[in-house]
Image (cartoon, rainbow, N blue to C red):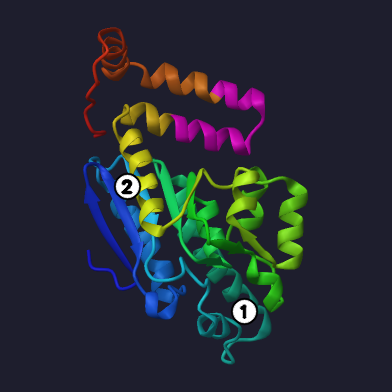
């Protein structure tokens, strides 16, 4: 598959999805929103992929939504006002899906952030499992600065990732949220002094994840996501059912044998 706003590569069970429009600050055009859904569909279809790294190019991770695209969403004079608003709502739901596919992806996803991660960029990285950033990078919930409400995932996912009062301050003010603060609140897993070092940190983590049982890994992510969205009682029932179904395979025996013999286990790809 050929992409215009992204690149996809796979090496040693780790996929890299790279934003590839540095001259345009990796802004999110209509093609970007469509290609994110497509590329994660491709990732889901490949059993050889066990972890994903989302990276970017140039000085900034992304400057967020392409504002011309936003202007084009606002109205269609051929429709009455009710139909215009319904079409706008449908478009927002489509854009939400572009990051929900990351959240739902069966394998862990790590974002590597350099420079600015603005507006829609925050929506993107909050849909990832883990985040690594450079020490000069920053996040901005930009939407308040252009008079709109963030609507593609930040306000729904970030409450589980930073203290509630901090999220409210960031969303209400649109101020920059830098590496020191992001690390202090646990929003990022690691901070590196260069983009290359941040990528190296992310790939080290990704390779460690890729070496584990892919069946157990997809189960952990599924259970964590379910637990985030449901009660404790319901989540306990879910994990009991998951393990009752999925512990029938070869991976637990292989993993326990490796622990006892102090060797590295090898696991088959998912089907």
Q: Is 223 in the magenta?
A: yes
Query: Quick one: label 1, few (<14), some, or many (20+) residues within 10 Å?
Result: few
Query: Which stretch did the figure color magenta?
Result: 220-237
Q: Which residue is mark 2?
A: 44
Residue located 24% across and 21% down the image? 264
Q: Is 36 in the magenta?
A: no
Q: Which residue is mark 1?
A: 83
Q: Does residue 83 sit above or below 77 in this rendering? A: above
Residue located 76% across and 56% down the image? 168
Q: Main secondary structure of the magenta part?
A: helix
Task: Name the one closer to the observer, 172 or 205.
Answer: 205
Quarter occupied by the N terminus: bottom left
Residue located 61% across and 57% down the image? 154
Side (left or right) of 74 relative to 112: right
Tell me, for residue 10, which label it has, or none: none
Judge whether residue 129 can be spotted in this image: yes
* Between marks 1 and 2 in the image, the one whose residue lies nearer the viewer: 2
Q: Secondary structure at mark 1?
A: helix
| Residue farthest to the front, as pictured | 193
- For residue 47, which quarter of the picture? top left
């Amino acid at each position: 598959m050929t992409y215009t706003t992204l690149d996809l590569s796979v090496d040693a069970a780790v996929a890299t999805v790279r934003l590839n429009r540095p001259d345009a600050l990796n802004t999110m055009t209509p093609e970007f929103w469509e290609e994110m859904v497509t590329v994660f569909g491709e990732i889901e279809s490949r059993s050889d992929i066990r972890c994903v790294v989302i990276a970017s190019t140039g000085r900034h991770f992304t400057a967020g939504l392409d504002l011309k695209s936003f202007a084009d969403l606002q109205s269609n004079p051929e429709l009455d006002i009710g139909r215009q608003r319904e079409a706008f709502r449908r478009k927002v739901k489509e854009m939400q899906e572009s990051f929900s596919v990351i959240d739902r992806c069966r394998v862990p996803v790590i974002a590597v952030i350099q420079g600015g991660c603005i507006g829609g960029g925050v929506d993107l990285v909050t849909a990832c499992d883990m985040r690594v950033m450079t020490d000069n990078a920053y996040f901005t919930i930009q939407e308040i600065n252009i008079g709109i409400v963030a609507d593609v995932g930040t306000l729904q996912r970030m409450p589980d990732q930073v203290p509630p009062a901090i999220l409210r301050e960031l969303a209400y003010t649109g101020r920059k949220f830098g590496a020191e603060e992001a690390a202090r609140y646990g929003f990022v897993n690691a901070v590196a002094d260069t983009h290359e070092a941040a990528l190296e940190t992310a790939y080290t983590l990704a390779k460690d994840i890729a070496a584990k049982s892919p069946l157990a890994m997809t189960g952990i992510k599924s259970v964590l996501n379910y637990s985030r969205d449901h009660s404790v009682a319901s989540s306990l029932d879910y994990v009991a059912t998951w393990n009752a179904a999925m512990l029938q395979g070869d991976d637990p025996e292989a993993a326990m044998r490796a622990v006892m013999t102090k060797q590295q286990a090898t696991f088959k790809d998912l089907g």
